[in-house]
Amino acid sequence: MRNCKIFFLFFVFITTLFLFRGIMAEVQKDLIHLVLKDGTVIIETRPDLAPKHVDQIKKLILADEYNGVVFHRVIDGFMAQTGDVKFGNTNKDSYNIQRAGTGGSSLPDIEAEFSKSNHSRGAVSMARTQNPNSANSQFFICFKDANFLDGQYSIWGYVIEGMEFVDNIKLGEPPNDPDKIIEMKLISKD
């Protein structure tokens, strides 16, 4: 009888430990504040879907690479693309709106991390060339469901607040006087 009680207590302890670990992992997801002209967009990272992509985005944010980068491709009803830190950053001498969208960063390209997750409204996914392993720094935010992209692009986050500010980004490829990222900063959840 005593062995049964010890086994039961051990079972409860292990179960509690795994539940606590799962809760802590959920609490430690990162949030990104993407500050635009009209307000702050909050993106929740999804390292469970694309850990290498999340890691690269975080490195670029911590190096202040995204501050001043324009939205160089904004298609009504589809998506807003940004993230060319080489040619799309208005704070750098290399800024060239005609070349924005052709550059990346000094970091290496990332291997594809495709998932079955949906490119729904607010999905944040990596841009790439025809080569699936060519994502680097550019990303896009979907204005509405774009499920035809599912399994072909790496989703690394979802907008959880402020999508109305994304909706206000100037349209064009590139837009005249394009909107830009005022600031992009990494925030850890409490």
Image (cartoon, rainbow, N blue to C red):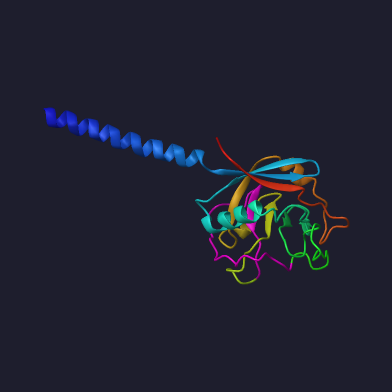
Coordinates of residue 52 in the picture (x, y in percent): 53, 58
The one of 44 and 168 positioned closer to us in this rendering: 44
Which quadrant is the N terminus positioned in? top left
The quarter of the picture where residue 132 lies is bottom right
Q: Is residue 140 visible?
A: yes
Q: Residue furthest left?
A: 1
Coordinates of residue 166 in the picture (x, y in percent): 75, 46
**Residue drawn at (61%, 72%) of the image:** 131
Q: Residue furthest right?
A: 176
Q: Is residue 116 above or below residue 133?
A: above
Q: Is residue 91 above or below residue 166?
A: below
Q: What is the chief secondary structure element of the magenta stretch?
A: loop
The one of 65 and 51 positioned closer to us in this rendering: 65
**In this rendering, position of residue 17 left or right of residue 184:** left
Which quadrant is the C terminus positioned in? top right
**Residue drawn at (77%, 56%) of the image:** 71
Q: Is residue 115 visible?
A: no
Q: Does the stretch in magenta take in 112? A: yes
Q: How many marks?
A: 0
Coordinates of residue 176 in the picture (x, y in percent): 88, 57
The quarter of the picture where residue 23 lies is top left
Q: Does the stretch in magenta take in 78? A: no
The one of 60 and 112 positioned closer to us in this rendering: 60
Coordinates of residue 108 in the picture (x, y in percent): 60, 67
User: Magenta part of the protein: which range?
Assistant: 102-129
Q: Residue furthest bottom?
A: 131
